[in-house]
Amino acid sequence: MAKIFDSTMLVETDWLEKNYNNSNIRIFDCTVWLNPHPNKIYEIESGKKDYDEAHIPNSDFLDMGEISIKNTPYPFMMPDSVTFDDVMSSKGVGPDTHVILYSRVNIQWATRVWWMLRAMGFNNASILNGGFDRWKAENRKIINTPIQYPKNNFISKPITECFCTKEEVEKHLTNKNVSIINALRSTLHDGTDSVDYGRPGHIKNSINIPSLEMVDSNTNLYKPLEELEKIFETHEILNKEKVIAYCGGGIAATNIAFVLTALGYDNITVYDASLSEWAKNNNLPMSID
């Protein structure tokens, strides 16, 4: 029997079209744009403008800036539980709700929020397969009227193992029972790309499984779970005691974490600051292939 994604983790557009008006559903566009910038890695732009122009019916916009630590050198860091609870409560999320997450062009923004919710002990969240692009390509209903869900009472139960610091990565650099996975594209991993996080290349002894390989570029849909399983089996990931996923800033890495969770692998942690921190510290080992 073919392996398929758990329907509680990944929902299809036809299901959402039938259910988006359900009273317990909370749908969020999580889009962020990373625009080229001459003086830094990229310029962060909220996707709110795109949401205002067109979005899935009954969906609200969830601003990543509101659920991330402010005044830190590393973007999109996981906030304290009080901040997270306040934002989620104001967005209508509580124990009685089913959260549906989507983003535009790159699903990683939706998986970032999915992983954050999981880290706060909330497991009733799903990713929309194909995101907004798939929804639009199928000519499904799109509106530009903003949505405001009624306030709820989100109470987090943090699971600290979902995210880790550089010390955790350092501890496992030479542990062959732990896989450290770089979710960035291959040209960033091998150091040939010009994007500069501080030093080129990757964390020493880490392997490269790009987040973009999880999704079919032609359809924006996740590849079949059996195909994804083979990608990880090639690197013997599923036999390891633990996986540490990282990228540039803890975003793409959550897509790796999402797929591994779908495959039934559960000892995963995301290095939140990722190369935004590691590449700037000359005492932390990096490699170029």
Image (tube, grey):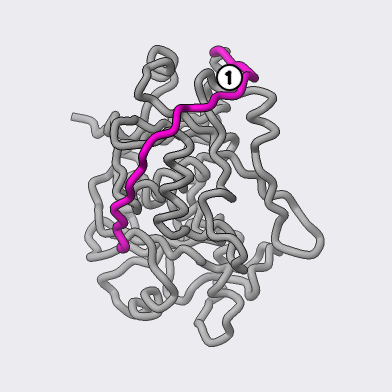
Which residue appears farthest toward the left when viewing the image?
A: 1
Front residue of this view, candidates 35 and 157: 157
State the SS at label 1. Answer: helix
Q: Looking at the image, how many numbered discs can be counted on the residues?
A: 1
Can you see residue 5?
A: no
Residue 42 location, quadrant: bottom right
Rendered view: 226 above or below 188: above
- Residue under pointer 1: 137
Q: Quadrant of the C terminus?
A: bottom right
Q: Residue at x 60, y 24 (%)?
A: 146
Residue 178 location, quadrant: bottom left
Residue 232 horizontal/vertical position (percent): 33, 53
Q: Seen in the image, is 269 located left or right of residue 88?
A: left
Which residue appears farthest toward the bottom when viewing the image?
A: 283
Front residue of this view, candidates 191 and 255: 255
Residue 69 horizontal/vertical position (percent): 54, 60
Query: Magenta residues, as a range?
Result: 140-161
Q: Residue at x 27, y 45 (%)?
A: 263
Residue 226 horizontal/vertical position (percent): 30, 38
In reply to whether residue 148 is colored magenta, the answer given is: yes
The amino acid type of the residue labelled 1 equals Ala
Rendered view: 177 above or below 4: below
Q: Within 10 angstroms of label 1, few (less than 14), some, or many (20 or more) residues?
A: few
Can you see residue 148?
A: yes
Front residue of this view, candidates 16 and 176: 16
Residue 95 location, quadrant: top left
> Main SS type for the magenta part?
loop
Q: Seen in the image, is 284 located left or right of residue 144?
A: left
